[in-house]
Image (tube, rainbow, N blue to C red):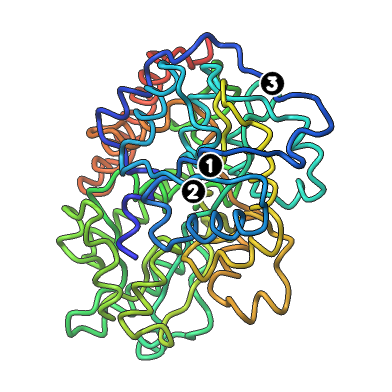
Amino acid sequence: MSKPLLRRAGAVLPAVAATLALALVPATAASASSSPSFGVGATGTVQFWNRAATCQGNLCKVLVNEFNATHKGLKVVLSYTEPNQAVSKLSTAIRAGTVPDVVGLNDINVPVFAREGALTDVTQYVNALPFKKSLSPGHLGLTEYQGHYYGAPYLADLSVLWYNKKLFKEAGLNPNNPPNSFASILSDAKKIQALGHGVYGFSFAGDCQGCLGFVMEPDLWAIGDKLITGPIGHQTIHIAGNKPLASLLELYHSIWADKLAPANDQTDNGSTWGDDFEAGKVGILPGAYGFLPGITKAGILKEVGIAPLPGPNGGYSTFDGGDDFVIPKGAKNASGAWEFIKWVLQKPQQRIYPSHGYTPVRTDILGPAFDKANPYDAVALKALGHGYAPHTTIYNAAYNAPGSPWFQMFSEAVYKGNISGALSTGQSGFEAVAREAGDLAS
């Protein structure tokens, strides 16, 4: 599996970000049929679009092949949307009236399509799922708009804290005691840095806007601190005067100023993210669970530990990244699409996710057997229940676009040490983006 850069919430090109701002269809979403047979015993063909970036471990192929082998009257036809083309391709299909039946869509983009009335309302069917309470709250939350659900969780691509147990031990630290606060991250990084010989205490992708949001925001969500709050269309920005955010930026500034991270981190756009950790030269790496295949291939898995991303003084969270299932308005076989979605969400299918590089979206499959078979993924899955993803239509513009308000704030604080100025820049920048999108509360 390649570097998970293309799977981050941050992998959005300017053209795609612009596409998100376009009106798609009149803002009235179709509701799925209320027939009791909806999603049961469907026949025909289901056209399924899956992001190529989230089938690098062949999960989508395995699911489709198994479904087709066990559902003789219903066939799922798999097609890929190329990296950074998923949104524009779906937008074009919606405008042309030639939509697929089901799409695996980057979950952070779902609110845009829901707000534009481009998706089928599946509220009653989501509510009827007996395992609804165990579904990823972040993924499910992104399908909700004005009290209705317009999709369901598909697969999780989560942020975690990786650490090198061998370096911890050499630095006199407990290899079974990962950092659980901002203070312990800084303290542990300093002790590891003291080992010398080209070893660094910490590493981050400093020129990858999405990567930074993916691993830093959970540190705030761990204590319930969210930068964007309120319903879509009436949102408030909480950056100026945000003490936990100031502490987080101060942590990264201290790491940078004390040279606890490699100098080339400042220009890392995500293409080499985690390479230094896989080489055994970094003690602490906030990153993706998707780094596991690379760590395994590097032959250092036995030396590596995994932990949730901690809050300022405890607690933990994760960025509920990955994909949601959505059924576009006008789908020819919505019933078959929902039958496929329900099948994928069953426990037998969920249990195969780890072997293909992803985390399930149901926390109720956790247990002794799963934990023993998937010790690393179990840590990520436990964090899933405490996870979140910003419920907003401005995420791409506020975080991922080149020169985004988020990145301007990060750069001003971390590389220049101007924390107060950075918070002011962030507040005005986020508000400007929200205002332009018609999302800022009056």
- As measured in the structure, the alpha-carbon distance from the residue carrying label 1 to the one carrying label 3 is 25 Å
Instruction: Using the image, determine if residue 123 lies above or below residue 417.
Output: above
Q: Position of residue 244 (x, y in %)?
A: 49, 46
- Identify the amino acid type marked 3: Ser
Residue name at image x 58 percent, y 31 percent: 327
Disc 2 to disc 3: CB gap under 8 Å: no
- Identify the amino acid type marked 1: Ala
- Identify the amino acid type marked 2: Gly
The quadrant holding residue 192 is: bottom left
Near-viewer residue (405 or 270): 270
Of tags 2 and 3, which is closer to the observer?
Answer: 3
Near-viewer residue (413 or 273): 273
Disc 1 to disc 2: CB gap under 8 Å: yes
The quadrant holding residue 161 is: bottom left
Near-viewer residue (77 or 267): 77
Instruction: Using the image, determine if residue 334 lies above or below residue 243.
Output: above
Q: Position of residue 8 (x, y in %)?
A: 38, 49
Instruction: Using the image, determine if residue 441 lies above or below residue 152.
Output: above
Q: Earlier in the sequence, mark 1 or mark 2?
A: 2
The quadrant holding residue 363 is: bottom right
Q: 10 Å neighbourhood of mark 1: few (<14), some, or many (≥20)?
A: many
Q: Position of residue 170 (x, y in %)?
A: 35, 91
Q: Which residue is mark 3?
A: 31
**Horizontal side of residue 351 vs 211, given as left or right:** right
Q: Which residue is mark 1?
A: 389
* Secondary element at image label 3: loop
Q: Earlier in the sequence, mark 2 or mark 3?
A: 3
Q: Which residue is mark 2?
A: 321
Q: Earlier in the sequence, mark 1 or mark 3?
A: 3
